[in-house]
Amino acid sequence: MLRLPAHEVLQPRTVAEAVALLAEHGEKAMLIAGGTDLLPNMKHRLFEPDYLVALAGIEELRGVRDAEGGLEIGAMTTLTEVAESPLVRERAPALAQAAGLVSGPQLRNMGTLGGNVMLDTRCQWYNQTYFWRSALGYCLKKDGSKCHVVEGGQKCVAAASNDTAPALMTLGAALQFAGPRGPQELAIDAIWRPDGIWNKKFGRDQILTAIRLPAAAAGHRGAYGKLRDRGSIDFPLLGMAARVDRDPAGAVADADLCVVALQARPTRVRKAAELLRGAEPGSPGFDEAVEAVAQAAHQQCRPLDSIPGDAEYRHLMVPVLARRTLRAAAEGATVGVL
Ligand SMILES: Cc1cc2nc3c(=O)[nH]c(=O)nc-3n(C[C@H](O)[C@H](O)[C@H](O)COP(=O)(O)OP(=O)(O)OC[C@H]3O[C@@H](n4cnc5c(N)ncnc54)[C@H](O)[C@@H]3O)c2cc1C
Ligand code: SF4
């Protein structure tokens, strides 16, 4: 049986108290939201904080609210609540679909949107027990000096594997933080670093308090497609979110396609908007544009062996997932099982 390392749980009632506790205990403390990722990681001795600052008792961090036609979602809102919220389904369908495809129902009932955004990167040589990792001599990300994915590599390429991240990118989300230097708002595109050890640009002393989505365009449509081993529960082998905004005549006015489970940061497929603009879903021109984006994605996205599953197979599935996700988005549908 894997046991948790000894630790003390601190239970603030306000964000200000939580910020103060993080500042007081520095590197000895970590935040815990639903705990669905952090606790297994602690059992694997990937993190051994002396203090867990629990966000569960802070009411102000929960809920989905209208924000000037857009949405404000508290960081502690559970994935189930996000997936089932009528407001999220109507205004941000890609996010509702992505949240509904994270792991399985029990973990979605505990796991939060904030914890998903802040998820640690994943690697099949890292997300293992201490004993397993010790047999391999550990790795760069934790306790060792070698990367087992890139021979001689000096940089960790563990992959961002959070399903909601690409959906939030296509929706132009802004993240609100509280911290010792005061509140901060950052566009989600601006938070990522290409470093699997810590793939975010802000300090570990900051608390994500809310995710804000601007009002969507009138003809907004979105979808999230996920490749995984089992339909019931699994991290993405590939995850793709699409936004297709249609003008009053039905043609594509704007579009976006973002991918997760490749490298340390989620990736935007370049030229997706350029290739799709003006095409009318249902017409041969739209099919050609989708094919051009699928091929651009295949060229740009290079899955690595950090994620389980054959990397070449995952690479071949990039255009398949791109086609299905873009079509589902354009039609206001879901991608279905892959
Ligand atoms: C079997 C299994 C399958 C899974 N499958 C998937 C999957 O398919 N897709 C997927 O995306 N995830 C998956 N997960 C991971 C996890 O369940 C989800 O990502 C979940 O959303 C994490 O949220 P949480 O609230 O439980 O975060 P926690 O585990 O509590 O925290 C995760 C990390 O975020 C930090 N953190 C949490 N909240 C905040 C905040 N408000 N501000 C700053 N930092 C914060 C924590 O310190 C920790 O480092 C899986 C986990 C397991 C165990
Ligand atoms: S990519 Fe994997 S093996 Fe390489 S350093 Fe990162 S976690 Fe370790």
Image (cartoon, rainbow, N blue to C red):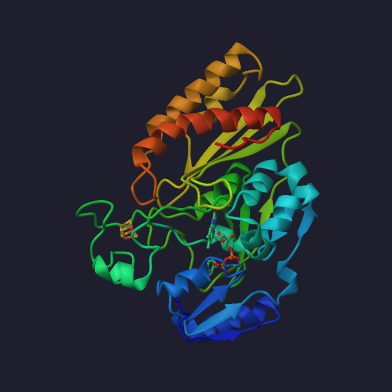
- Image height of 100 relative to 2, above or below: above
229 or 70: nearer the viewer: 229
Task: Place residue 19 in its image quadrant.
Answer: bottom right
Residue at the image position 39 percent from the left and 45 percent from the top: 309
- Image height of 10 relative to 271, above or below: below
Q: Judge left or right: residue 297 versus residue 81.
A: left
146 or 178: nearer the viewer: 146
- Image height of 2 relative to 156, above or below: below
Residue at the image position 72 percent from the left and 40 percent from the top: 216
Q: Judge left or right: residue 78 versus residue 140.
A: right
Task: Place residue 171 in its image quadrant.
Answer: top right
Q: Position of residue 120 (x, y in %)?
A: 47, 62
Picture quadrant of ligand 2: bottom left
Res 166 visible? yes
| The N terminus - image quarter | bottom left
291 or 227: nearer the viewer: 227
Q: Position of residue 184 (x, y in %)?
A: 60, 64
- Image height of 328 relative to 133, above or below: above
Res 144 visible? no
Residue at the image position 24 percent from the left and 54 percent from the top: 153
Q: Position of residue 202 (x, y in %)?
A: 49, 64
110 or 178: nearer the viewer: 110
Residue most extreme to the top: 284
Residue at the image position 58 percent from the left and 33 percent from the top: 325
Residue most extreme to the left: 152
Q: Judge left or right: residue 82 versus residue 66.
A: left
| The C terminus - image quarter | top right
Q: Judge left or right: residue 72 versus residue 243.
A: right
